[in-house]
Image (cartoon, rainbow, N blue to C red):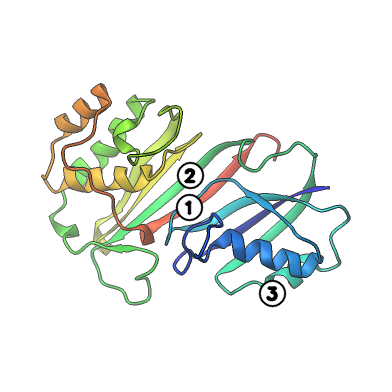
Amino acid sequence: MRYFARLAYRGTRYFGWQRQPNQISVQEKVEDTLQILLRQQVEVTGCGRTDAGVHASDYVLHFDFDAELPDQFLRRLNSLLPPDIVFYSVKPVHAEAHARFDAVSRSYEYHISGIKDPFREDTVWMYRFFDKLDLDKLQESASLLLNYDEFFPFCKSNTDVQTMKCQLSRSEWKITPDTRSAVYLITSDRFLRGMIRLIVGMSISVASGKISMEQVKQAMDNQSRLIEAVSVPPQGLFLKDIRFSYF
C-alpha cells in the first residue's frame, strides 16, 4: 500500500531534506525512524527538496508499506522522531499517487525582521537595515515577476533542470512597518534551485537602491543574470501549503 503523510520540520540542524553522504538530512531521520517502527527498510519520496537550514511548515511525502500501519502509528512515530520533526497525518492513497509529481502548487514564505530577537534567530533573517528599505519598491519588485513565466535570473548556476518555466500565481510582500518586519509570499507550480532566496535578495537590492527596477526588468526580458545577484540566508525560508488536485 502507498501512504501519503503530512509533516513539518525545523531545518536548522539539517543539511537539507535529501539524504546525502556524510551529512545529516531530514529524509535520513524520517527513513531511519520509519524503519525502526515498521521493522523493514522504508524509502520515502518527498514533494521537493529544501536546502540546508530551510524549514517546512507543511511538507508531503509518500512511502510504500506492504500492510496496514500499526496501531497508534502517528503517536509512536512522533515519539521516536527528534523534536524538530513532527508528522501531522498519514493516509492510504492509490498506488500511483506521487508526492512530488502530483503536486499542483507549492508555496514559500521568507521572513525578515529589523529587530534582533534571540528567540527567532533560526527562523527569520535579522536585517538591520530594514528601516532604510523603500517599502513601495520592495512590493513593486515582487509584483513585477507575475508578468513572466521564465526565471533564469533566479536559478543557481550549474543546475541540470531542463526548463526555466514556472507558473507563479502569487508574488507579494506582507509588510508590517510598526514591527519592522516583512514576509515574502510566493506560490508556483514549481520552483528552480535557489529561486526564492535569489528573488528575496533582488527585492532587498531594489528596495535599498543597489539595483533599479529597470535592471531587473531587462534581466527578465533577456533572461540573463542580474549584475548583482544576492542569495539571502536560508533561515528565514519556509516551504508550506503543498496542494494536490485529489485532496
The residue positioned farthest toward the front in the image shown: 21
> What element does badge 1 sit on?
loop
Give how far apart the Cα atoms at labels 2 and 1 are: 12 Å
| Amino acid at the residue labelled 3 | Leu
Please tell me the numbered disc located at residue 80. 3
- Check disc 2 and report the residue beneath it: 107
Q: Position of residue 214 (x, y in %)?
A: 15, 29
> Which one is earlier in the sequence, the residue at label 1 or at label 3?
1
Q: Position of residue 162 (x, y in %)?
A: 46, 28
User: Which is nearer the eye, 109 or 191?
Assistant: 191
Compared with 173, 22 (above or below) is: below
> Which one is earlier in the sequence, the residue at label 2 or at label 1?
1
Residue drawn at x 58%, y 67% as measured from the top left: 85
Tell us which disc is closer to us: 2 or 1. 1
Compared with 179, 202 (above or below) is: above
- Check disc 1 and report the residue beneath it: 50
Give how far apart the Cα atoms at labels 1 and 3 are: 23 Å
Classify mark 1: residues with Cα within 10 Å, few (<14), some (14-19) or many (20+). Answer: many
> Which one is earlier in the sequence, the residue at label 3 or at label 2?
3
Residue drawn at x 38%, y 69% as measured from the top left: 122
User: Which is nearer the eye, 13 or 109?
Assistant: 13
User: Which is nearer the eye, 220 or 162?
Assistant: 162
